[in-house]
Amino acid sequence: MRAPHAYALAWLVCAAPWGWCQTPAESSDPLVVGTEHPRLFLRPARLRLLRRERERQSLRWQQFSRLVAGGAQFPEPGFALALDYAIAGDQEAGRKATAFALTSTDLRQMALVYDWCEGAMSGADRTRLAARIARRMAETAADQSVAAVRSRLLGAVTLFDDVPELPGREFERDVRGWWRTKVAEPLSAGKVPFQREDAYPLLELLHAVQDNLNLDLRESNVDYFKDFPVEHLMSYYPAPYRGAENDFYIGAATTRSKDPDLEAAALSRAADLAMVAYDTNAPQTQVLQGWLMHDRFLLRGAFGVPYEFLWADPYQPGLSYYHVPTVYYNPDYGRLFARSSWDDDAAWFGLFDGGAQLFADGHVTMVDPRVEAPPLALDDATVCFGRAVRDFELTLEDRQTVFVVGLEPRRSYDVEVDDEQMYQADSDRAGIVELDDVPAGKPVAVHLRERIVKKASR
């Protein structure tokens, strides 16, 4: 697999290799949970960290505990109240979380309450909740979305000792079967099977499997997951959005709406935090940590504050994202993101999931890359639109790479640049051609012609 664009990886020269666990797919050994409760996310190191945050009365703990003490209406009460019980031992919070779980159909929250509130439940309530979780796992078995599979795996992990056979069957079906056919194989074929909103449930799934089954599912597609944090970072629009409690960065979406979905924005930040927690030593996630350390973006509302408290580690050092190049191009998946700078007023271009967008002056514009338009000049890249017009007059600054978009996918083109020898370039699966040798500092003409392959005569 080709690595993403050289700019996007230049700062990783000294990167250390990942410290992965065993591979998941090839082994035929039974998948067994050997951990004690709490199993889901609150493994011993994180549990100690969060309890120290409570002892120190950190900002995140104060924000979270004040909402709990004030009787805030949490959109996810099982998650929030169970977390408070797990960290502070608040019996009332544990009882309320249990009462919610015993009447809820939200499998994820039911599993978290079962795992985190063991000491707050009577034996009868625990038996009833285990039965409800098992029943809900069966009811959602046909749902193959990332969120649904995540929730079933959380249920299987927490029920492993208490419900015979069901967890083992779920592990085989989802960890080995679903992951291979719905994730690993499409990624190997150059198809991204996720939407941006799948990032957080995907991270919960990865955490649960690594923490309890000692498997790192990323190992099935090393190159994609290595750069996933940087791609996620580059796919944010530059300008922050001011919410009622805190500011948000808004992730690029394939569909437009009048107002951004702030719950989706909160989950996007939660995904970033969970990525850092999953692999704290990788330079890609250290850059993400640098992105996350600005206090104005701390999640303070009733939906986001439990996620902020659960996943944030303010003691984890981060790298400045200003060191990350402003161009990310992955030809294996046909994804291109470029911005004019790392400032909030930057211009931004993204081509992903079959569409293209331009963000400038605080507004998103959907772009058809096949329609003729003037070249778009950003800091390190110039984007040319070439479905019909394939002759360009360019004057590049130093370090700029030219991308021609809107071409036919997976075709060969003859490229001719003034005073340069003609050469062949191939478009990727999204119709992008990268030209990295166009001379800078003077006007030049660039010509692309689709290469015609003559059929051999019989």
Image (cartoon, rainbow, N blue to C red):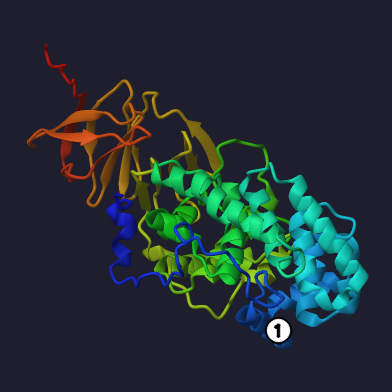
Image-based side of 409 in relation to 354, left or right: left
Q: Name the spot of residue 8 as percent of width and height, x first.
A: 34, 56
Residue drawn where x is 73% and y is 70% of the image? 161
Please say if 317 is above or below 154: below
Figure quadrant of the C terminus: top left
Image-based side of 145 in relation to 14, left or right: right
Q: Name the spot of residue 455 as percent of width and height, x first.
A: 16, 16
Residue drawn where x is 59% and y is 35% of the image? 255
Give the class, few, some or many, for how many residues have Cα within 10 Å of label 1's Cα (few <14, many ≥20): some
Give the labeled residue for mark 1: 51
Residue 243 sits in quarter? bottom right
Disc 1 element:
helix
Of residues 83 and 150, the one nearer the viewer is 150
Count of all numbered marks drawn on residues in the image: 1
Residue drawn where x is 53% and y is 44% of the image? 182
Image-based side of 33 in relation to 408, left or right: right
Of residues 254 and 121, the one nearer the viewer is 121
Q: Amino acid at mark 1?
A: Arg
Let me know if residue 424 appears in the view.
yes
Residue 202 sits in quarter? bottom right
Please say if 320 is above or below 456: below
Of residues 2 and 145, the one nearer the viewer is 145
Residue 127 sits in quarter? bottom right
Let me know if residue 293 appears in the view.
no
Residue drawn where x is 41% and y is 60% of the image? 226
Please say if 275 is above or below 429: below
Please say if 48 is above or below 353: below
Q: Name the spot of residue 418 as percent of width and height, x first.
A: 11, 33
Image-based side of 152 in relation to 337, left or right: right
